[in-house]
């Protein structure tokens, strides 16, 4: 988890982009984007996410209402988890 790498530090910020995060490799168990992924849904951003997230980690994408006009959103399997 990030706290394991950042210690007890709270309220931090890092300078970076979705394509170039200011994090070491394999430091996050998950990345989450809410209402924003369409702004950086690029190959470079996905590769950077893969670099930063630990093997077996997850990418969580959240929308209030899926935009079915986007091809990959319309084609995705519907999955709900609680």
Image: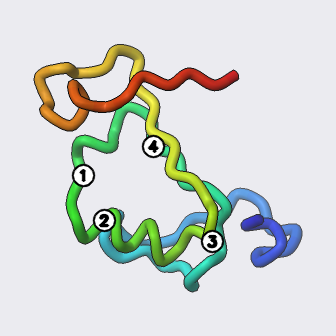
Quarter holding residue 63? top left
Q: Residues within 10 Å of mark 2 (few under 14, many from 20)?
A: some
In-front residue for pair 1/11 = 1
Q: Return the residue at label 1.
A: 41
Label 2 – label 1 distance at C-alpha:
7 Å
Image-based side of 33 in relation to 55, left or right: left
Q: Residue at x 51, y 43 (%)?
A: 60
Label 4 – label 3 distance at C-alpha:
17 Å
Residue extending farthest right = 8
Q: Residue at x 34, y 14 (%)?
A: 65
Mark 3 residue element: strand
Image-based side of 60 in relation to 36, left or right: right
Mark 4 residue element: strand
In-front residue for pair 39/81 = 81
The image shows residue 26 at horizontal and vertical percentages of: 61, 78
Mark closer to the observer (2, 3): 3
The image shows residue 54 at horizontal and vertical percentages of: 63, 71
Q: Residues within 10 Å of mark 3 (few under 14, many from 20)?
A: some
Numbered tag placed on residue 45 in the rendering:
2
Mark 2 residue element: helix
Labels 2 and 3: the sequence-earlier one = 2
Numbered tag placed on residue 33 in the rendering:
4
Q: Residue at x 83, y 72 (%)?
A: 4
Q: Residue at x 63, y 63 (%)?
A: 56
In-front residue for pair 67/73 = 73
In this rendering, the answer to whether 44 lies above or below 58 is below
Labels 2 and 4: the sequence-earlier one = 4
Label 4 – label 1 distance at C-alpha:
11 Å
Residue extending farthest top = 65
Q: Quadrant of the N terminus?
A: bottom right
Q: Return the residue at label 3.
A: 54
């Amino acid at each position: 988890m990030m706290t394991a790498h950042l210690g007890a530090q709270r309220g931090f910020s890092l300078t970076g982009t979705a394509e170039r995060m200011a994090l070491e490799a394999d430091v996050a168990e998950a990345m989450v984007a809410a209402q924003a992924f369409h702004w950086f849904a690029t190959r470079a951003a996905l590769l950077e996410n893969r670099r930063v997230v630990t093997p077996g980690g997850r990418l969580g994408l959240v929308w209030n209402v899926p935009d079915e006009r986007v091809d990959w959103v319309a084609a995705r399997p519907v999955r709900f988890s609680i």
